[in-house]
Image (tube, helix red, strand yellow):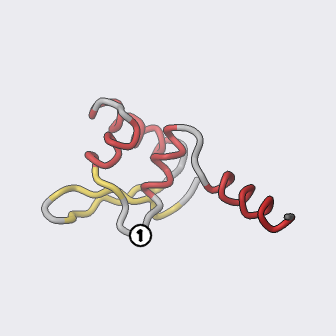
Amino acid sequence: MAKKTETAAAEAAATPTTKIGTVIALLRREDGATLAELIAATGWQPHSTRAALTGLRKQGHVIEKSKRDDVTCYRITGAA
């Protein structure tokens, strides 16, 4: 029974509970996230999503921009 509790606790800790936590989790993926993926995950408008990226940069996160299938992709390469 203890293993199930530990596994559930670990999964709960790994699951982001806030929208900005969701954004950070998507940006930490190996291939990062596109603006459209971030918008779909949060329900934010494009300008709000871009503002969140700016806020993360101001907090000290290093966000790299690259291209994936001719779409800009963002990825956290360094943490605050």
In the shown orientation, is residue 34 left or right of residue 80?
left
In the shown orientation, is residue 37 left or right of residue 54?
left
In the shown orientation, is residue 6 left or right of residue 12?
right
Which is nearer the eye, 78 or 49?
49
Residue depicted at x 74% and y 55%: 9
Where is residue 49? Give x, y as percent.
Answer: 35, 37
Callout 1, which amino acid? Answer: Glu
Instruction: Count the marks.
Output: 1
Q: Quadrant of the N terminus?
A: bottom right
Q: Is residue 64 above or below residue 37?
A: below
Q: Is residue 58 above or below residue 63?
A: above
Residue depicted at x 77% and y 63%: 4
Residue 69 falls in which quadrant of the image? bottom left
Residue depicted at x 39% and y 59%: 75
Where is residue 43? Give x, y as percent.
Answer: 36, 33
Q: Residues within 10 Å of mark 1 (few under 14, many from 20)?
A: few
Residue depicted at x 79% and y 62%: 6
Which residue is most to the left?
Answer: 70
Where is residue 47? Give x, y as percent.
Answer: 29, 31
Which residue is most to the front?
Answer: 1
Which is nearer the eye, 25 or 65?
25
Q: For numbered disc 1, what is the local secondary structure?
A: loop
Residue at the disc numbered 1: 30
Q: Is residue 22 above or below residue 28?
A: above
